[in-house]
Amino acid sequence: MWFANFFIAGSITMVLPFLSLYIDELGDFSSSFVQTWSGLVFGITFVTAFIFSPIWGRIGDRYGRRNILIVSATGLALSVLLMGFATTVWQLFLLRLFMGIFTGFIPMSQALIATQTPKRIAGQVLGTLQTGSITGSLLGPLLGGFIADSIGYGTTFQFVSITVFLSAFIVFFGIHEQKVEKEDEKEKSSYSSREVIQHIVKQPVLLMVMIVSMFVQIAHFSIQPILSLYVGELHGPANLALFSGIAFSAAGLGNLLMARRWGRIADRKGYVKILVFLLFMAGIVYIPAAFVTNIWQLVALRFLLGVSIGGIIPVRTAYIRQEAPVAMQGEVLGYNTSLRFLGNIIGPAMGGMLSGLYGFSAVFFVTSGLLILCGAVMFMTMYKNPQSVRHAHSV
């Protein structure tokens, strides 16, 4: 599953560096047209992903998550392949819309591994799994830019579709899913969507963990559209693409180094406690980024941000593993993924608007405030519901 996630994340991120350049190549467009449609083409994928994630999660609970992963990877491969033949911006837009239907491969793989893993080591195992997608995300943009320069944008899409399909091949031949009906005699073997939503709403800590997922994505993605511009302001135009890549990758490196360790620590100390700590840590790290005076200060802070953000995904997934019965885990994680995709939509729009109105520093201040507020509310929720936190320790 690690290798399947590596190929999916690496392949999908390969096309991101030249997506706007590909749009520019499809016609004689103004720069404002290209910028506008780059945002629309990038963001539309998350809209359909937001809608379909709970649906795939529910189907996975009923018919097996391995089968959904094969369908997801195949759908992604077909979408990317057809993008290489697009001749208009509208065709590319519609294909990115279609691609969003199948975008939940990595969250679904987390749901699969969570149900196949003993609760006592869920955080460590999910942290290890996450390093696969992080490694792919670090290498993907670098390889994508190099390949696109060598063989052209359209051909690169077609090449990438082969590596995406390789993930479907890996899952089909390399993964055996053991059906786990229930872990407790009181559990049911299936749940309606209404029962799943009631289960989430009746557990304040679980509900808050899922809402935090959205705000973490808002915070993380609010910086993405302005990071290259901020790097240019700090460093100047010389080698801007290279230094922007270094700033992006620094967070990924911190994430890669610490994801597994945070998962292991949370297995011992409790998932909610570590989640609260990481939210405060991420919020505090964001503040000094507004005051940096050179690129290397920003890179160091991005690395520390990656260290803190890196633990949040495996820790929250492991907590859901603890609190949701096996027969509904896929759907619960599907709702969690939907909230994350909603954050992916809101974050870039918020970051761009704030930077345009009040400057780059405002984005860092607001983002920091969001994360610290989430940490504070999460702490209060934990304090008021000690029974939920106590159950979330390793067994």
Image (cartoon, rainbow, N blue to C red):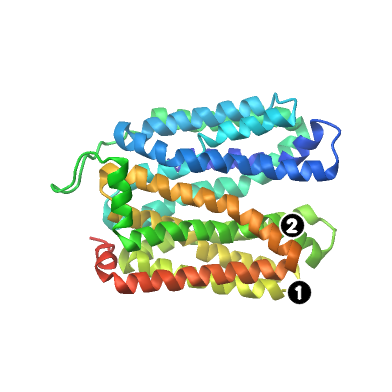
Secondary structure under tag 2 reads helix
The tag earlier along the polypeptide, 2 or 1, is 2
Which of the two residues, 23 or 202, is positioned nearer the viewer here?
A: 202
- Which amino acid type corresponds to the residue marked 2 in the rendered image? Ser
Classify 329 as above or below 374. above
Query: Horizontal and vertical percent for residue 101?
Result: 51, 34
Query: Horizontal and vertical percent for residue 56?
Result: 41, 36
The residue furthest left is: 185
Classify 370 as above or below 131. below
Q: Quadrant of the N terminus?
A: top left
The residue under the point 77% across, 52% down is: 241
- Which amino acid type corresponds to the residue marked 1 in the rendered image? Thr
Occupied quadrant, residue 36: top right
Instruction: Using the image, tell me which numbered label, if any, was put on residue 82.
Output: none
Which of the two residues, 228 or 267, is positioned nearer the viewer here?
A: 228
Q: Is residue 5 visible?
A: no
The residue under the point 19% across, 43% down is: 188
Callout 2 environment at 10 Å: few (<14), some (14 to 19), or many (20+)?
A: some
Query: Horizontal and vertical percent for residue 281?
Result: 51, 72
Which of the two residues, 228 or 301, is positioned nearer the viewer here?
A: 228
Instruction: Using the image, tell me which numbered label, if any, was put on residue 293.
Output: 1
Instruction: Using the image, tell me which numbered label, if any, was put on residue 228.
Output: 2
Q: Is residue 231 visible?
A: yes
Classify 38 as above or below 224. above
Marks 2 & 1, CB-CB < 8 Å contact: no
The residue under the point 83% across, 31% down is: 27
Mark 2 to mark 1 CA distance (whole Å): 15 Å
Secondary structure under tag 1 reads loop
Q: Is residue 334 left or right of residue 252?
A: left
The residue under the point 64% across, 54% down is: 348
